[in-house]
Amino acid sequence: MSAIPVLAGVIIVTFLLLRLVPGNPAREVLGIHASPRAVDALTRQLGLDQPIWRQFWRYLDGLFHANLGDSIYYHSPVVSLIATRIGLTAALVALASAFSVIITVPLAALAATHQNRPSDHAVRAVSLFGLGMPTFWLGIVLGIIFGLHLHWFPVGGQGSGFWGTLHALILPALCAALAIAPVLIRSLRVGMLDVLGADYIATARAKGLRRWRVTLVHVVRNALIPSVTLLAVNIAYLIGGTVVIEQVFDLNGLGTLMLNSIGNRDFPVIQGVTLVYALAVIVVILISDLVTARLDPRVRLR
Amino acid sequence: MSAEAVIGVDDAGESIVARSSFWSRARRSPTFLVGGSLTSLILLILFLAPVLARHNPDTLNLTSLLSGPTSQHWLGTDDLGRDEWARVLYGGRTDIEVGVVTVLFPLIFGVAIGTFIGYVGGVVDTIVMRVVDVVLAFPFYVLIIALVAFIGAGVHGIFLAFGLTDWVVYARLTRSSTIVARHQDWVAAAVNGGVPRWRVLLRHIIPNTISQSLVYVMSDIVLVILAVVTLGYLGLGLQPPSPDWGAMIGEGQAYIFTNQWQVLIPGIALLLTGTGFSLLGDGLADVLRPQ
């Protein structure tokens, strides 16, 4: 993925989102009972009275000055609304990514090294079952089990202080990690099987290297390369999943800001948050490209 | 009886077997059989909803709110006293219907676009693939939620949101297999033999590229049903009064301290449906994979 054209495309798409609103967005925001004067004022505030290329220029100009416009509902800059909430969402994504690695890599390795044996079938069956599991429902069920019955974690809310927040984020992060686990395990397993079947592994074994050395030096290193890319793609999906998970666990992050703004018809905020999410994905993919290049001499030399 | 009929011997002395038919291969795939049976059973139950449900899903019964399973209400009632069993059945009907109908346009449009750009190549190909990259740069749920937010909640919003985004996966799949197929000898033979281009595409390329998309459709239906239910949970999906598993779970979440049935039952129904379609998709992949 080449980042620059994608970035440009993402900016154009988020700009065009407002065009999808049937009729005049200002009328949509204010409701049918608003006076024509109020509608005109908001139309001007949103810049909708100008030709579309000028609106786009205004939007671009704002982006270069880290300005995503003003919230209609909160009457404050969208950027500051995002800034106060992005930390919690970032922490949730980071914790969930860590969980997903801890959960999926050993299971995929177990399945790949025991291909077509009971442990492989068990891992595949469980991950297939997980494909049909809705994230938000899994969250509620986890809340019922570990919050309501066992009292290990809070059912909702974000706690206070560093440890309080961390404690409150464990269930949501686990939920986000489990949501991508099925797909991730299935693809990691296939990637590892490819490596295990490769000629250089047979060579390493044939020349009498010890089993653990073959696994650590040859299998892990080579399996890591496609795994990093797979992880990045799935973390991109995971980031989207946190929108719903924040709602389930009542966390005041970016996702909740987005959903509340949908309820408030606060279009500039929805646009801004959507853009930030897409930027986060682009950054994650870029990092994975760089890591892959570090790990794989073939990519580095190209 | 062997499913493979030996129809001759080639130069190397190996038996030439006729490609076994779809059904004979399907019968040997346990995944396909289990997935197919589970999916058919679920579809049959939902189809028979008017017979199986003894209550109307929208009838309020204010004398029995949030009850557990009783002889009257097999799966209990919700916060308005509506029969849970009837609501699960009718909710499943709408969710699966919407899910299946929603993937049709992305499937057809994506395959058409993918075939076209894979066959033509050049600038058109580059431009379309850039658009695909951009769509994939958004986290799936963020893009769907944002689109529905701007277009408006409900079936209309769901159709449009998926119509605008979901085709890219089919386009990508079809494009890469079309590029492979285009360079095959039999395509060159057909072209050189004077077969018109549209006929080459329809008769020689698409039949060889479509199976991947048909396999993916099964996983996609699961994805879309999950998304429709999730949107319903967020209040952005199918609008009341049409029963929907997501909205049911959302309404039930407010009462988890007193009654957990209302959350658990639609979720389990969804889980079974998702597993059925996923197994069927995996099985279909086994059956259609070239031997």
Image (cartoon, rainbow, N blue to C red):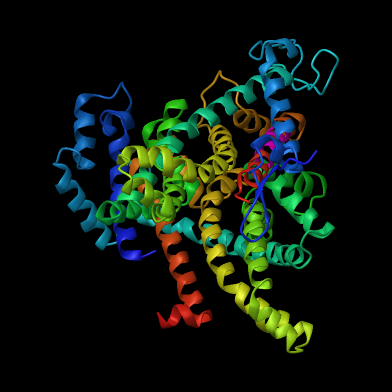
x%, y% of residue B133? Answer: 38, 55
Residue positioned 66% across, 18% down in the render: B47
Relative to B207, residue A205 above or below: below
x%, y% of residue A15? Answer: 28, 47
Left of A232 or right of it: where is A215? right
Q: Is residue B255 visible?
A: no
| Bounds of the magenta segment | B268-279
x%, y% of residue B280? Answer: 67, 39
The quadrant of the picture occupied by the C terminus of chain A is: bottom left
Q: Nearer the viewer, residue A183 or A73?
A: A183
Task: Find out whether residue A68 is within the magenta segment.
Answer: no
State the image quarter where residue A28 is shown: top left
The quadrant of the picture occupied by the N terminus of chain A is: bottom left
Residue positioned 74% across, 85% down in the render: A206
Q: Nearer the viewer, residue A39 or A213?
A: A213
x%, y% of residue A301? Answer: 42, 83
Relative to B108, residue A193 above or below: below
Residue positioned 78% across, 22% down in the render: B75
Please, what is the dominant secondary structure of the magenta stretch?
helix
Q: Is residue B237 visible?
A: yes
Relative to B89, residue B108 above or below: below
Q: Nearer the viewer, residue A223 or B203?
A: B203
State the image quarter where residue B129 is shown: bottom left
